[in-house]
Amino acid sequence: MERSIALSPVEEVHCGARGVPETVGMAALFTGRPPGADALRARVGERWGGLPRLRRVLLAPAPPARLRGHRWLPLDRFDARRHVTAVTAVTADGGDRAAFTALLGRLVARPLPAGLPPWRLTLVTGADRGRFAVVLTAHHALLDGRSLEILLSSLFDGTPGRGGRSGTGVRAVGALSAAHPDRARPGPRRGD
């Protein structure tokens, strides 16, 4: 394991300055049959396992805190079972869109656990008649809105993310592939 790393000034601002949110989140909504939680965890390990940023734990400043900043502690890996959770949205009529939206809001606002890399992916099933959601929440010092979008896209597209493990046997999560079909990406042409 490496030594701790100082946060950048922008990251430090997102660690609790008044008026700056500490948690950001994004939800991707789908129709159809949701993937199982274990399949989603395997996909996260395959696609995101090699991303160093997702293996950092946020450390509080050492005393005196007013003179020192937060630090990142890099880990060798993250545990997808602790970061990827599943919840079932239960509504009175089985399809109340307002209740589903409220649940998504609560998931983004829920505090992130201490001692782990500060991000969470939640699979939300059982709501709004045949719809499901995948909600990515992170500490704002770790990820911003564009980073959330890039991570979710890399989870759903047809190629592993940079540095991700390959050969895990998880080629695609059926529901995610159906929701965001693999796209052929043009490669270099011969003779170029």
Image (spheres, helix red, strand yellow):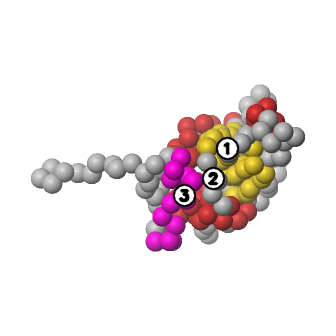
SS label for mark 1:
strand
Q: Is residue 85 above or below residue 141?
A: below
Q: Is residue 173 magenta?
A: yes
Magenta residues, start to end: 167-179
Q: Is residue 124 left or right of residue 55?
A: right
| Residue 86: mark | none
Image location (x, y in percent) of residue 133: 67, 45
- Circles 3, 2 touching at the beta carbon (< 8 Å): yes
Residue at point 33%, 49% (across, down): 185
Which comes sooner in the sequence, label 1 or label 2?
2
Q: Is residue 2 visible?
A: no
Image location (x, y in percent) of residue 36: 66, 61
Which comes sooner in the sequence, label 3 or label 1?
1
Which comes sooner in the sequence, label 3 or label 2?
2
SS label for mark 2:
loop
Q: Which residue is labeled 1 in the image?
A: 131
Task: Give the spatial CA distance, label 1 vs label 2.
Answer: 8 Å
Residue at the left extreme, as displayed: 191
Residue at point 53%, 46% (across, down): 179
Q: Which residue is labeled 2 in the image?
A: 33
Residue at the right extreme, as displayed: 92
Q: Is residue 39 left or right of residue 166?
A: right
Image location (x, y in percent) of residue 95: 77, 39
Dot 2 amino acid type: Arg
Q: Is residue 30 visible?
A: yes
Residue at point 43%, 56% (across, down): 159
Viewer-nearest residue: 100 or 24: 100
